[in-house]
Amino acid sequence: MHERQPEIEEAAVPAARGRAIVITSGKGGVGKTTTTANLGTALAMRGARVALVDADVGLRNLDIVLGLESRVKHHLLDVIEGGVTLDEALVPSKYNESLMLLAAAQNREKDEVPTEAMTALIERLRERFDYVLVDCPAGIEHGFRNAVAGAQEAIVVCTPEVSAVRDVDRVIGLLGNRFKPQLIVNRLRPQLVKRGMMLSVEDVNAILRLPLLGVIADEPEIIITTNKGEPLALRRDGATGAAYHVMAAKIAGEDVEAPTVETRDSFFGRIGAFFGGKA
């Protein structure tokens, strides 16, 4: 299904202990940054050392989701350009000392991040952290290739909307086989699915055909905690927080089941022609 595009060249990098995972989406506003913050928090709560890199230069938001906006003094480009050390730029989480943030530059352009420099920076982080999660600019806009440089894996965040799925399909085509992408379906509304008014998880993956990492329902508490700068993964006793921890366990290699979602008579067939007639 995926429209093949020239794949991103694989960086020639030495093996390292840490895993660099880019978190991307087909368009903005689907919860990619919130997902990055929560997965990073859940992995850190498992005892892993985690670095979160906000690579969305000019649209910095990861610091807000983590409640760290007042603590950011330096950013990614400061490190790349040699103005500060990596230690000076990394900001520790308020909730877990194993979780660190490298913020994006707010008043710079995406093309100011050289691919080679980004690859080298990610390698430095891989030497120090078990996981490096890179919050990538949405879609295939300018800066996408630089943001994914140095990563070995990808997590694609998609909402169950026709336009979002189509955009993600384009991103998957660009990523190619190198990144072994996995899928998170975000903001699912089970009641709308049952009424045939929203794509189901099965519908989405019938189009994208990616390994399913997890599903997050569209819950008001996500907005509330995000506005407070408190990742919902801190509340692992709740359904949504628990879902992030299940995904973190799967990322860590544990054999756990993804949350199940009720299915219905698919309306995927009604939109199949929109994606080239596959149903």
Image (cartoon, rainbow, N blue to C red):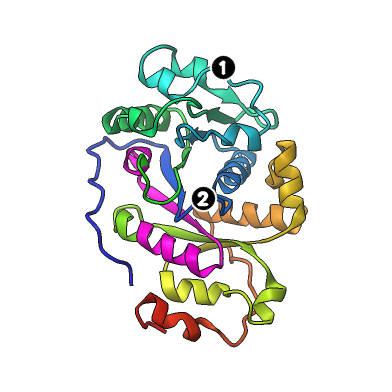
| Image quadrant assignment for residue 81 | top left
- CB atoms of marks 2 and 1 within 8 Å: no
Q: Per the image, is 157 magenta?
A: yes
How far apart in space, not on screen, are marks 2 and 1 (Cα)? Answer: 26 Å
Give the residue pinned by disc 1. 73
| Image quadrant assignment for residue 3 | bottom left
Please state the extent of the stretch shown in magenta in the rendering.
144-171
- Residue 65 horizontal/vertical position (percent): 64, 38
Left or right relative to 271: residue 260: right
Q: Amino acid at mark 2?
A: Gly
Mark 2 Cα shell of 10 Å, populated few (<14), some (14-19), many (≥20): few
Q: Earlier in the sequence, mark 2 or mark 1?
A: 2
Give the residue pinned by disc 2. 28
Front in this rendered view, residue 263 or 107: 107
Left or right relative to 196: residue 13: left
- Residue 56 horizontal/vertical position (percent): 46, 37
Q: Is residue 95 above or below residue 25?
A: above
Residue at position x 36%, y 39% in the image:
143
Res. 24 in view: yes
- Residue 214 horizontal/vertical position (percent): 57, 61
- Where the N terminus falls, by quadrant? bottom left
Q: Is residue 130 above or below residue 21?
A: above
Q: Per the image, is 123 magenta?
A: no
